[in-house]
Image (tube, grey):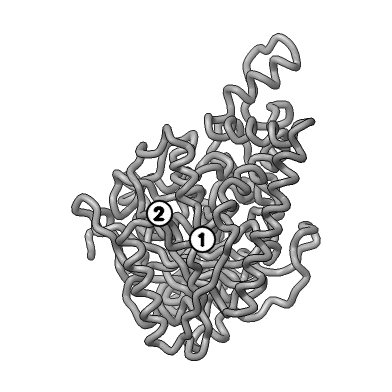
Amino acid sequence: MDQIFTLDVHGLRSKLAAHEVSPVEVVRALARRIEAVDPAVRGYLSIDLERAIGEAEAADVTKPLGGVPIAIKDVISVRGAPCTCGSRILAGYRAPYDATVIARLRAAGAIPFGRTNMDEFAMGSSTENSAFGPTHNPYDPARTPGGSSGGSAAVVAADEAFAALGSDTGGSIRQPAAFCGCVGFKPTYGRVSRYGLVAFASSLDQIGPFTKTVRDAALLLNAIAGVDPCDSTSLDEPVPDFTTNLDRGVKGVRLGLPREYFVSGLDPQVERAVRQAVEHYAKLGAEIVEVSLPHTEYALSTYYIIAPAEASANLARFDGVRYGYRAEQPGDLLEHYGRTREEGFGAEVKRRIILGTYALSSGYYDAYYLKAQKARTLIRDDFSRAFRRVDAIVCPTSPTPAFKLGERANDPLSMYLADVFTLAANMAGICGVSIPCGFAEAEGKLLPIGLQILGNSLEEGRVLQVANAYEQTTDWHKRRPQSVTGNA
């Protein structure tokens, strides 16, 4: 029972349903694991053990996720729990309601347990922008776990969580999943309600799961997907059982290999691992087809106009008047606003607010924001054309393995490039997953490499099918970080 934290969700559910272990025992075992490991990882910002035990005592183990604790990124509202978004400006704030995804997890029997660290307001690629300090990669504590959902990825990889929720605006689920060697799934825009998610860029944000296996990702997606009257952007589309076709394999499936994703700057070890994964798919019976996404070169600059513009509008609500941090003894209202935001927001958030406000300002709107929206349409059209030829696209998740903490802190462009292979999917609104496909060696450490599988809108089932075919015929997902867990 002491090693129960090593189980995945599917395995834990089997033991809970068979009454081999109780939900309370699971929560207590997980709490001990967190106490032992998290001082090195620093993936959690807070946990409420007493509340989790209370929910575990009442858990119905006959439900799909009955008795399973799920870690939650600190940007998703859980009633009565802190929701700092990794920022000082929300100091003391507690969410007055459950986000829809939390309500749906509870309805499926799950127990929200623990708030995970993140880049402030989800703005970052390394979890170094958190006001509460960085999270460390379980495979090498000197390196970043990725971001912005680095805390969620790290606690799953370090067996401090059976699964976790994160948010993905430009790769914030898939990139940290790649860096930490776990599964990170970004659903189609609108497939999962964003009600209760603190907004970064409203046309890009999407909630999704971090898990140890593809099957677990399907289980969580079953629970959280679906239309929501509280979110007008959620899609009123049928939600299938995403586990149904997991084991159908890839024989006859057409997989696209985008030539624009294999360019200079791609780490040779990453490229080798991804190409070997593609060869593996071919051996499993998939047809490999080269495709082109010609506007990929504009994706980074387009994203960093649209996302900051939307952020500058969304973050205007944080003014210290109604909740959160408030500057002391301001001289007048204008000084109150200025000092509160100056003292409460971190450097990266300020940078993006300034960029976004500039792009939306009079005289520059047409030159920047409107032009970026036109480029976004071209990027979306690239994917639409590609998916007329192929069933899914396979490519690297990130151009490099995890980089060192502090290595890119003073070089924003270098940091932004960490998401160069992920952010186009958000602009197109499509779904995607990152799964482990190998390791790179750096300074005596083995660092995970992620394989990204992208699918057309509402094709989550196909993406999961393709991902599961690889996972079930390889053993990369079974590896655990030796530096934290003590096992190979």
Which-is-in-front pick, marks 1 and 2?
2
Direction top: furthest residue? 331
Quadrant placement of the N terminus = bottom left
Secondary structure at badge 2 equals helix
Q: Do the residues labelled 1 and 2 touch (CB within 8 Å)?
A: no
Closer to the camera in the image, 97 or 295: 295
Vertical order, 194 against 142 (above or below): below
Q: What residue type is labelled 2?
A: Ala
Secondary structure at badge 1 equals strand
Quadrant of residue 476 within the rendered picture: bottom left
Vertical order, 262 against 94 (above or below): below
Quadrant placement of the C terminus = bottom left
Residue beneath the point at 62% across and 58% down: 426
Instruction: Choose the circle earlier in sequence order: 1 or 2.
Output: 1
Residue 70 is labelled as 1
Q: Is residue 159 visible?
A: yes
Q: How crowded is mark 2: few (under 14 residues within 10 Å), some or many (20 or more)?
A: many
Count of picture labels: 2
Closer to the camera in the image, 133 or 363: 363
Residue beneath the point at 35% across and 67% down: 6
Q: Mark 2 points at which residue?
A: 154
> In the picture provided, is 176 more to the left or to the right than 276?
right
